[in-house]
Image (cartoon, helix red, strand yellow):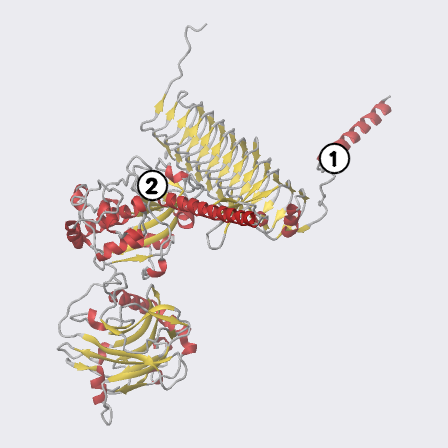
Amino acid sequence: MKHLKNLFLLLLLSFFITLTACKEEDQQKIDDTLKNLGWFGDENNATIPNDINLGTGTVPASVNLLPKFPPIGNQGQYGTCVAWSTGYNFRTYLNAMKNNLSTSALNSTSNQFSPIDLFWSVPSSLKGADCNGTSFEAALDILVSRGVTTLATAPYTGLGDCSSQPPSSWTLDAGNYKISNYRDINIDKNVIKGYLADNRPVIIGARLGNNFMGWNSSSVLTTDGTTYNGQHANHAMILAGYDNNQGPHGAFRVVNSWGTTWGDQGYIWVDCDFFCSTFCFAAFVGADDNNNILPDTTVTGYDLVGWEMVDRDNANSGDPLDRQCLYNVNNIGSDEILASKKWSILYLYYNAYDANDYGILIYDYYTNEYGSLGDDGDLSTVETDSSKFLGSAGNWYNYLNIPGGSSVFEIWAQNQNPPATGTRFQYSYSMPSSVNGDYYLVLIADGFDVIPETDETNNYVYYCQSNGDPLHIDNGIIQGGYKSLMTNMSTVKNTSHPNTYSTKEITKLLMHEKQTGGLQKKVLNFKSQQKNNIKTFSNK
Amino acid sequence: MKKTLFILSLLFIINGIATACTYKTPNTKDNIKNNSKESKITADKIIKQIQKDEPVYYKDAVISGDLDFTAIKAENDESIGEYRSYINSSITFINCSFEGKLIASRKDTDNKANHYVTFSKNLTFINSEFKAEVNFSESNIIGIVNFAGSTFDEITSFEGAVFFSKSTFFSESNFKKELKFQRTVFEGNAEFLKCTFEGITSFQSAVLKGNAQFGATKFEQYADFTNIIVNGAVYFNYAEFFKQAIFDNGTFFGRFEFIQSIFHYIAEFKNNTFYGKTKFTQANFGGKTFFDNSVFYNCKPNTEDIITTKDTDFTLENTIYIESQKLENFK
């Protein structure tokens, strides 16, 4: 009897296990089906930087970037759409724009980039078996770190199960065709139109239904259901324009990779409202040569360098939000930088994955507007216009000229009576408690890019983890025991984080925000947290 | 005699009026609670009735709050992340005003689940006013559907809905904002006679298995009838289109009539297949009109006495007409 009872329990257990396994298997089958078109559907947007949104002005009624696109591609039965949208279409477009390629030139495989090379390069752990899809992040990371070779070198044949590695000759050539970065953007029709109007195609991840699958017309798609299994199918494509006069709300021109017999000769118009509300679930832009940055004017004579920076707990305060920043900036150029240039040193934080989430902590302003040569002090003691207080934790003015070969601290110290000793400034500040997430702290010499310098890239000193990872900050408190001296000169860009914001993107953001008044508004929001912080000096 | 006749006539008239009055009284069954005297009803109360499978019948009432049919518990997943509630009550509202939304379709806030509704019995909202959004997307309605004479003040969607009854009535309704009938399936006739469509209207990819009656309608904004399939006849006689009228990529198996219709702006009939007779008799074309790549299997369209303006421009690139063959020597 006892044996029977055990047998019954065993059977029950095995039935349960079988049932569970079946459910998991069914789920896996469905998941695999969804991947068939080639996009996994879920992007880890938390680790993809948002594009710095500088707002969009008026955009034209229509934009057509197709003249710089290759002919419609065909991914065949393989789940390689991500490689087609990012490698074949997007990378080819960037190259065509850069080299002003003609339509006939774009018909040549030597000017088209290879989806097989890109898909094979994605690590097996980041793609489905048997060429069954991948994520944008995986493919775009390859484009940033490795690049992609041309279809002439790597024709789209013999894909096998896509587990092969590209031959070294492909990889060698791919190094010539990297991209600089890619950025996540908001799915908003005005935002997307702004990028397209700026000649920047938008890579998209969409969820499809039967209506899309069987589309065979030049009409504007305004609706869709689900696919054969009652679910949406995830698919990667790219936008090559828009036309406000197509359909009831205007429409985006979508480039697909299903050959020319599908849709409107391989393309489709998708209604802008439907696109944003239902169709599109991921959108990215990218750049191949930092075209998201300022043009640089090379001028010999001036060159400011963020020389050193330490960020540490404020030992004099029990409040963990209170910290100290110790820094110096050198002019390694040959010419004196006059106070009349009205330049500044900024200390700020910005979100590693959304630099629109930033704040200036310290605003150290070099100007001849207040007092006389050699004077310095708290800006609020000489300035009544609060819109000029750009630092949420402190603002300082300095009437100092900085000769070539001198540091700002050195000149400041000489002007004290008696002359000060030490090697760097020490500024107490408070981190706003609203700061939550992964952030970089950065000291920027000439934060608003007022001085035309020989080298603009050496203005930055970062406070981050030793491997370039951002600091994790909870409610304004830096986590992980990073007390001080975790600084990194020039840039946080490194091999493990190739897609971080460039220093010039940060500068562009700051300049734009200053010009539009966004910076001042941000500071006012933090005003309640401002404390009386004093800039002194330190030789520690 | 005259007096007798007069009295008889009077009695006959009185009887007639009485009969007519009786006829107009709603035919309520004993188990239907007649709520016609209640003026203000909360949506929650109606949901509770539905939860008990009680018939819902209201006349001349004001319904306050959102009437959320998805609040009825879904018994099973329809698909992964897709849930469908089943409503077994008959739903009848006559001359009612809805202050809140009508929700028969919604997404969870995290976008991970969709909730839809199947109505097993009738769905009747005669001469009613909907002051907020109406959303019946992906609904299945087994019983008769009647929204005749109603006014929809805000965005209204029947996108992906399926109407199973032999006729679906929206006649003389007024849609003041955007209206979505995309992918809607009408298993029977679709009655939109004398409707006014004030907002953008889309029937893209709708399937109409019976006749489509859009006679004497007014489309004040963009009207999108692309990719539709109609098994029965299509009537847009006396319809008026104030903006673009787009009828591209359709398949029309029955008659296709736009007699005395008025197109103030662009009219597109591209890439269509017309199996039945087509009539544009006395239609007024005020702008560019496209018939490119369309195939007419049953002769050229009747375009007798059409009216054109200086802006009218017909394009007929690759348009094909297949003449009907007369049956000869057939005995």
Which kind of residue does numbered mark 1 sit on? Cys
Residue farthest bottom in this picture:
A418
Q: Is residue A40 left or right of residue A10?
A: left
**Residue found 58% across the figure and 43% down from its top:** B86
Image vertical order of residue B155 relative to residue A376, above or below: above
Residue A270 is situated, as x and y percent measured from the top left of the image, at 37, 44
Q: Is residue B66 left or right of residue A84?
A: right
Image: A463 above or below A505: below
Q: Is residue A376 visible?
A: no
**Residue at figure coordinates x 32%, y 80% from the top left:** A312
Q: Which residue is mark 1?
A: B21
Give the residue number, with chain letter if any, for mark 2.
A268
Q: Callout 2 environment at 10 Å: few (<14), some (14 to 19), or many (20+)?
A: many
Measured Cα–Cα span from mark 2 to mark 1: 58 Å
Q: For numbered disc 2, what is the local secondary structure?
A: strand
> Residue A18, percent across and down?
46, 46
Q: Nearer the viewer, mark 2 or mark 1?
A: 2
